[in-house]
Amino acid sequence: MNYLAETLGVVYLAILLGLAFYGINSLVTAGLFLDVKRRLGNEPAAPETREWPRVTVQLPVFNEKYTMERLLQAVTHLDYPRDRLQIQVLDDSTDNTSSLSARLAEEGRARGIDIQWLHRTDRTGYKAGALEQGLASADGDIIAIFDADFLPEPDWLKKTVPYFQDAKLGCLQTRWGHTNREYNSLTIAQSLAIDGHFIVEQTVRSRSGLFLNFNGTAGLWRRSCIEDAGGWQSDTLTEDLDLSYRAQLRGWRIGYLPDVIVRAELPGYVEAFKRQQFRWAKGTFQVVRKILPEIFEQSDLPWYVKTAAFLHLTGYFVHPLMVALLLVTLPVGLFAPRFFDLLPISMIAMFGPPLLYAVAESSDTPSLKERLKILPLLTILGFGISLNTAIGVMEGLFGTGGDFVRTPKFNLGNQSGDKSALDGTYLPRVSPIIIGEIGLGLYALLTIFSLEPYMGWKIIPWMSIYSLGYFYIAGLNLIQHWQAQSRHFPLTIKQHV
C-alpha cells in the first residue's frame, strides 16, 4: 500500500509540474506581449507597390449553402486590379451547395470576374487535396485562402500583398475577427480564446523570431514557397500547421499582421465546437509526430526557438494532463494526502493563462472589465472541453489518419432572432463522449464529498470548476440537441452581408 501511495503521489507531482510548465509559458508569453505592444505601431508600413502581382484567391468549401452567397459577395468585391485577380471555388460539396456555388460563379463571370468553379466528387485529401488540386490551374504568384465563413474587407489584398516584396516572406497571416461574438455563452467564451491566440500569441511569435503557423484561412502564401516546402499534404488533419512548419524549416518566413482583421463565424453549436477542437488537437499531434523530431535535429536553431516550438506544437497536451489530474486527486487525497502540500508549485503558473487572455486588447475587443467578466466562463469551457480534446490528442499521438470533419456554419450574427428549420445533415449528432463528460462531472463531485471532511474547503474550488465545466458542456450539448430535434434551434439565417 505504501508503494502504491508513493507511486500515486509521484504521478500527481508529475502532472502538476507538466501543467506548471505550460502555465509558465503562458505567463512568459503575456509578459513578452506587454513588451512587444509598446513597439507595435512603430513598424515600417508596407512598401509601395508599382506593379501588382497576379493573385489567386482559393475558396475551399464543403456543404456550405448558408455562407456561400456572402462569401462570394465579399471576395468578388475585393479592391484589386481585375486583370491581376483570379478566384477559385474549390467545391467538394455533396449537397445543393454545388448548384448554388456554380450559379454564383457563373454570375461573377458574367460581370467580367475571372472565377473558376472546380467541383470534386472524390474528396481525396479533404481540404489539403482540394487546395493542391486547385494549384494545378491557379495562375497567381500569390495564393490567398478563405474558408466559407470568412468575410474579407474590400481593401484586404491591397493591405497585404505589398509585403511580398520581401523575397523571404513565404506566408502572411491576418487576424480573425468575429461576426457573432455575442451570439451565446459558447461564442462569448470562444471569442476571448481566439483573441488571446491572435492578439497575444501570434504577435509574440512573429515579433520574437519564433515558429508560428498559418491558421488555415485569412492568409496568403507565395506559390513558390508552397511548392518548395513540398506542397499541401493530407497525412495530418491540420494541413495548415504542417505546411507552416515545413516552410519555416526550409528557411521561409511567416509574417503576421495583427491590425488587419477578417471577420468570421464562431461555432454556436457545442457539438460542432467539440468536433472542431477534436480535429485541431488530433491534427496538431499528428504534426508533432511528423515534424517535431526534425526541429530538434536542426543544429542551427537556438535552444529557445526549439523550446518555443515544442510548447507551441504540444500545447493541447494540457488537456490530457487536466483529465489525469482530476482522476488522481481522489486516490491521492485518500492514500497520500501529504503530496497536496506541493500544490503551491503550480500557484504562480496558474496565473499565466488568465493573464494572457486579460491582456488580449485591441480596438475591436471588449474592455478589460468585460474580458475579466468572461474569464470565468472561458475557464469553465476549458475544463469542460478537456476530455473531448484529450481523446483527440491521444488519437493524434497513437492513431493513424482520420476523417476531416467540417465545422458547420450557419451565417450567424449576434442575435438569436427567429427560429429557423435547418438541414439536419448540417447538425452533428451528439458524440458518446458526453457520457464520459457527465461521468467526470459526477466524479469531481464525489471527490469533493470524499475529501472535504479531511481537507476542508481547499478541495472545493478546483473540483467545482471541473464539475461545472463538464456539466456545462454536456448540458448545453443536450439542450441544443433537443432544440435541433424539435426544430427550436435559435438561428437567424441571413442571406446577405
Image (cartoon, helix red, strand yellow):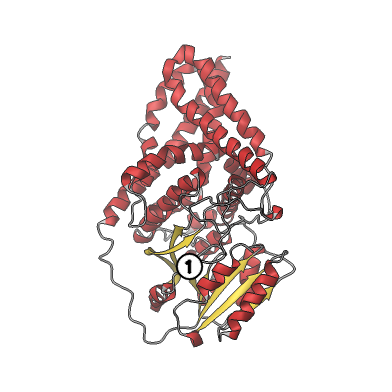
Q: Locate residue 225, reporting x and y percent.
A: 51, 73
Q: Locate residue 180, reporting x and y percent.
A: 48, 54
Q: Quadrant of residue 25?
A: top left
Q: Looking at the image, is 12 positioned above or below residue 125?
A: above
Secondary structure state at the residue bearing disc 1: strand
Q: Locate residue 328, reporting x and y percent.
A: 55, 26
Which residue is under mark 1?
Answer: 219
Q: Looking at the image, is 372 positioned above or below residue 49?
A: above
Q: Looking at the image, is 439 positioned above or below residue 152?
A: above
Q: Quadrant of residue 492?
A: bottom right
Label 1, residues with CA under 10 Å away: few <14, some 14-19, many ≥20: many
Q: Nearer the viewer, residue 489 or 392?
A: 489
**Image position of 432 (left or right of 450):** right
Q: Please report the residue visible at 45 percent of the width from the left and 37 percent of the height from the top.
A: 19
Q: Please report the residue visible at 52 percent of the width from the left and 24 percent of the height from the top.
A: 329
Q: Please report the residue visible at 51 percent of the width from the left and 36 percent of the height from the top.
A: 383
Q: Which residue is the extreme one toward the front?
A: 418
- Please identify the quadrant where the N terminus is shown: top right
Q: Locate residue 267, reporting x and y percent.
A: 55, 51
Q: Could you tell me if residue 219 is visible in this image?
A: yes
Q: Nearer the viewer, residue 351 or 192?
A: 192
Q: Please report the residue visible at 54 percent of the width from the left and 18 percent of the height from the top.
A: 5
Q: Nearer the viewer, residue 482 or 471?
A: 482
**Image position of 405 (left or right of 473):** right
Q: Looking at the image, is 454 positioned above or below residue 260?
A: above
Q: Which amino acid type corresponds to the residue marked 1 in the rendered image?
A: Gly
